[in-house]
Every structure is written in C-alpha cells, then in structure tokens.
Image (tube, rainbow, N blue to C red):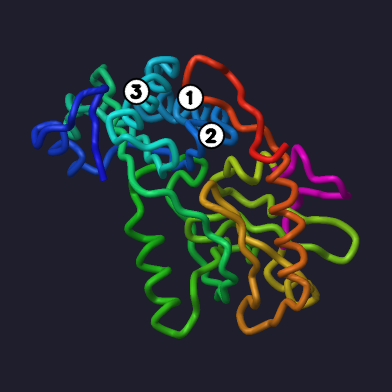
Amino acid sequence: MTLTCNGQPAQVEDLLPALVNYGHFTSLQVRDHAVQGLDLHLARLSQATRELFGSELDTTQVRRWMAQALQQAALSDASLRVTVYSRGFDFRNPLAAVPVDVLVAVSAPVALTAPRRVRSVAWQRELPQIKHVGTFGLFAERRAAMAEGFDDVLFVTADGDVSEGSTWNLAVHDGERLLWPQAPALRGTSEALLKQHWPGAQQTRPLALAELDSVKAAFACNASGLWALEAIDGHVLPGSQALAEQGRAVLAGVAWQGLGSDPFCAAKGI
C-alpha cells in the first residue's frame, strides 16, 4: 500500500491527526485508470466535507491527487481509499474553521463475488448518511456474526426495518420487482448505478425484516463488487445467484469515468 497526503508522500506527522477519528472517506475500484461512478464518489466526499467541516472540497484537485497516487504506485488497476480529514482539527474546539487534508491510499484491486450468509442485528451507524471513519461498531458486529458461523451482518432499525449491511447495500427481489430498503443508511455508489440502469421494475420503500421470510433472492453490493446472499438468518434464498448475475451484467454495461484528462472512457468490453 502507498499513502499520499495532499499529493505528497504521507509522513508520520500527517497521519497522527487521524487518531482523533474525525473524518470521512470513500472507497473505490480503479480499472485502466478509470472508475465507475467517479462523479458519485466525488459528490459523496464533497457533501460530507460540508457536513463535517463546514467547508467546500476542491474535487478537481482531489481527482488529480487520485490520478497522481496511481502514477506513483505504478498501477493502472487498484483499490483506492480517499479520506478527508484535517491536520488542524481540534476536538476541543470543533467549530473552528480548519483546512481539510486528503489522504489517498492505493492498494491491490479487489472484486467481491463470493456468496455469503448473513444474520440480522438491531444496530445503526452514527450519522448513517455519511461514510465516516467511525467504523468500530460495524466491525464489532461483523466479528460477532462471524463468531456464530455467519459471513457478515445485516443491520435493522429499532423499528424492525432493514437498513444496510456492514459495508454494503442490500437489494431483494419479491418475485415482481427489485426492492431497496428505505431506512436511514449510507446510499452506495453501486446502489445508485444499479437503480439508474436496472432494466426491470424496482422500488425503494420501508422493508420490514419480517418480510424477508417470503423473499427468494437477494444480493449485496458496494464499490468492490456484487455478491449473492445465500441466506439471511438461516432463511435460504435459492434465487440469489441468478439475481446477482443479473446485477453484475447491469454494472458491466455502465461506463467508466477516467481519472485523467478524458472525463469518460468506455466500459471494458462495450
């Protein structure tokens, strides 16, 4: 993994403010110097910067730093994590205006496709609409689920509505349409692209956990891939693999946006 801060190799002093655990990020996959939903990732960073720091993020500069980090790592395919934080942030005076900093981490590319079995738990992330760095709770819940033989965890609100997975969004099929949970959650970039390009009927609405007992298919998705959910709370979903394959086919037709000077580049194989 390589790390840059504001376009320069990250030094120890650049990383120490991250221990305060106040900031936000986006994670994405790069293929041939291009990203699916790049505009969505940048919009996520921009909006969260306004909410957490009360300032505007120069997304054009961020994009340049992302491309530069790839060049320095000598990679055209990679996983990127772009974290926005501030070396000047003081938790004793959080309202003070401070400049933000951008940390870009480059690592090997990943593609998640393996099916998983998940269990539900009543739990919700703080400020669920923001992809913030406060990840302790969600990883603790994932660990607890894995200790009981599951692969991951699905979050449910106190009212019994499904919201999101630990680091992914959920879609289920009721036999007529694709359903997206409406409960407070981080709305992912892959979810947004699938909603935009899904060829069949779909709906976003409150989805009670009890309704999943009648569901036959479901998949999980994030920027690292799309995978079938074989079972939720022991309820087997026999149609999930076919639904996941349909979802991956939809994403395969979505254009990739270049990190370089060209705003768009065609999807591979299209």
Give amino acid for label 2.
Answer: Val
- What residue is drawn where x is 61% and y is 22%? 264
Disc 1: which residue: 259
Residue, far right: 176
Disc 3: which residue: 65
Check contact, mark 1 vs mark 3: CB within 8 A.
Answer: no
Q: Looking at the rendered structure, which numbered label has been put on residue 69?
A: none
Which quadrant holds residue 244?
bottom right
Q: Nearer the viewer, residue 140 or 32?
A: 32
Estimate the x, y position of residue 231 in percent, counting from the top left. Answer: 64, 78
Give amino acid for label 1.
Answer: Leu
Disc 2: which residue: 35
Estimate the x, y position of residue 169 in percent, counting from the top left. Answer: 60, 54
The answer to whether 90 is drawn above or below residue 124 in the figure is: above
Residue, far left: 13
The answer to whether 214 is drawn above or below residue 134 in the figure is: below
The C terminus appears in which quarter of the rendering? Answer: top right
- What residue is drawn where x is 71% and y is 69%? 241
Range shown magenta: 194-207
CA–CA distance in space, label 1 to label 3: 10 Å
- What residue is drawn where x is 68% and y is 39%? 193
- What residue is drawn where x is 65% and y is 35%? 267
